[in-house]
Image (cartoon, grey):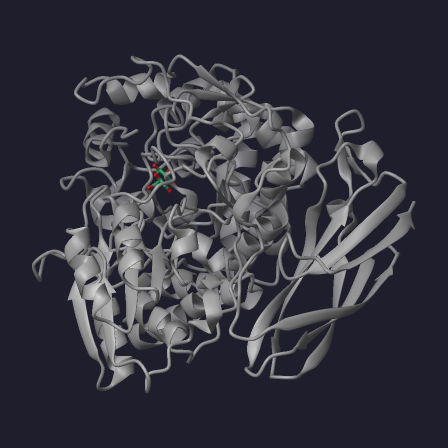
Amino acid sequence: MPLLPRTRLFILTLAIIAVPVLPLTQLIAQDRPATHLWSNSSLSPDERASMVVKEMTLDEKISLLHGTGMRGLGPLSPLAVDSNGGAGYVVAIPRLGIPGIQMSDAAYGVRSSGENGRYSTALPSDLGAAASWDTDAAYEYGALIARELRAQGYNMSLGGGVNLTREPRNGRTFEYMGEDPVLAGTMVGWVMKGEQAQHVIGDIKHYALNDQESGRNAVNVNIDKRSMRESDLLAFEIGLQVSNAAAVMCSYNRVNGDYACENKFLLMDVLKKDWNFKGFVVSDWGATHSAAKASAAGLDHEEPGEFFYGDTLKKAVKAGQVPMAEIDDHVHRILRSMFATGVIDDPPQKSVVDAARGLEVVQKIEEQSIVLLKNEHGQLPLDASKVHTIAVIGPHADVGMISGGGSAQVDPPNGNAIMPPGKGQTHWQEHIWFPTSPLKAIQVKTTGARVQYNSGSDPSAAASLAKTADVALVFAYQWESEDMDLESLSLPEHQDELIAAVAAANPHTIVVLETGGPVTMPWADRVSGILEAWYGGSRGAEAVANVLFGEVNPGGKLPLTFPRSEADLPHRNIVNPPKGTEPDGGDPGWWEKILRGLKAFQITYDEGLKVGYKWYDTEHKQVLFPFGYGLSYTTYAYSNLKVTPGKDVRVGFTVTNTGSRAGAEIGEVYATLPSSTGEPPKRLVGFRKVKLNAGESKELSVEVDPKYLSIFSVDRNAWQLVPGDYTFLVGGSSQELPLTESVNLK
Ligand code: BGC
């Protein structure tokens, strides 16, 4: 469901935010401090932060607790000059040598580069990166984003989406890391680690249970605490544990009655107390709904403006409704995060983005992320010397590949492939096709073959072309964006009909999917090959061509299940807000209405901890392609499972490349818990990716964190390993686990 346009949000934010009256010296950000006591970098971040807090006036403290409007108020505001043009800007405090915080969205690359006249590399979608199951690739993903953030003058990233895929029609599925908390949490953790190693503040979002976009400002998610801790929240917990990400963004929705950004259970009890989170909580843009309540619940910082965390908060402090200690804690958390991530000691210097290196890195990551779903009779890889005619079919496959929209959108180098040159800047919820041309990338590989293109708008014309070719390659897409959910999991624009028509005309039809998440495939039995390329980023087509022609052996695996139909999902239909829940976008007061809180409507996640494959396993539902699945041009065998109980259970096994090509295999380790726990049939507890030459064997070892084998006891408010028999299952897909061993754990 489309929500309100962001441009409007921006303009109205400007209208309601009072310009803070600051002395001129404060308006000129001089980020490099004179020497202060806290300049000593051998002190701990906490010591340094405490020293600064002691020196601060209340106004200075409050100024750190909110943004200045998207991109720093309007063009006439002096703050606009200091803002770097990103989604958020927090003023500097030059007197104390504290630089401003320049925040940019950066889910799969740095946003807003078009409107700021800059360059950003677009990576594969986050979900694509998760499909690599490769923590080194995830680290590189984060490091690349952070290098480009710094080159553009930012010191904080708003990426790190890790909401679990409870609802695959969620328009932001591409921005997240799939349906399993161990995979998603680990991968987002390594992305954040890569970012923070470059001295950029990392942020994990959207905490929590913002699992659909429809009615996101009003919805109240009902879910029991055990399920929450073992699924959605566990992904955040692992992500933070791996990375120490300095910021967590609370989400728009309510959870069990309270808005996430004023939800004491989420922010204080779980995040800050149980997980000992030392960083700061930033609200999603317009997700703050109170001052005193939010502050007490643990919200540290309001974005994008100061509707609650400006004068209102100051007055509440003066009136004794908000203790100064609480304010000091918020401020301390922000400052200690700035010290800990190095943004004070090593501020970003604007510089030239290393575009060539970026393109090389993103192509490699995409090559790791592509998942081969079907390859009948070894149709792939194509042999360039034997294929003489190729039909390339599909919307815009002559010029580009689709990308994901919303605040994740990256302005592609060279602009939108389907717009005239020079029109590079993207607009909210436009369909942006990255100028990476499948047609050209395929032509380059074939030297001499006749490669012809048809857009597929007329399926019978496409089928006629396919009939004349040795092989038909259909590039099918599904567009997704923030601010909308998908009506169904079907491909749009009659592409199912197109594929069926082409497949009927040519038995050598291969479908390349450019999708944000899972899609249904009524034609799956009729085509000979299927490749999932996700949103492939700036070098998507080159990566796909390398896989099609065998220069790269695909090794990605699905980070989420592809169901057979919507009827198999836990919720047959997405729950839409009742009419009138959201204020009308034309209503000048809509923004204020949202901030003051909308009437709640309910979603109950009664599938509880049965998310993704855990649902299909429990319900004995057949799926189209299971979680963890992905083929290769070689084959692998598993042997020698040895499970050694201990503090961390050690799972050892051997993987052998039994085919004739080198490749990379992802060994997946699942566990079945004792039946008394009432858990779904199995859960992922670890994985390893390994490169193997033809014929080569390697012994792998996975240390399983005891938490991954535990259940969350709400009574004890703790993870609990239930004594009993645990079965470990190992293999290359959640539904192909040839090795099993049971051990008794106490
Ligand atoms: C999105 C966030 C984003 C923020 C700033 C919000 O609408 O939900 O993910 O970081 O805007 O652009």
Q: Is residue 683 visible?
A: yes
Residue drawn at x 34%, y 36% as measured from the top left: 486
> Could you tell me how many numbered marks the image carries?
0
Q: Position of residue 133 (x, y in %)?
A: 56, 61
Q: Position of residue 733 (x, y in %)?
A: 62, 57
Q: Is residue 438 above or below residue 735?
A: below
Task: Using the rendered image of the protein, determine whether residue 425 is visible from the camera's viewpoint.
Answer: no
Query: Residue 328 occupies which quadrant of the picture?
Result: top right
Q: In front here: 684 or 298?
A: 684
Residue 319 x %, y %: 48, 14
Give me the residue at 52% from left, 19% from top: 258
- 281 lies above or below 643: above
Indicate the quadrant containing the N terminus: top left, top right, bottom left or bottom right. top left
**Image location of residue 80, percent across then percent down:** 21, 44
Give the position of the C terminus as an image quadrant. top right
Q: Nearer the viewer, residue 309 or 235?
A: 235
Left or right for 272, reference 717: left
Q: Residue at x 34, y 24 (%)?
A: 307
Quarter of the rendering containing residue 273: top right
Question: From the viewer's perspective, is residue 50 above or below residue 117?
Answer: above
Residue 659 horizontal side relative to residue 450, left or right? right
Where does ligand 1 appear, by image quarter?
top left
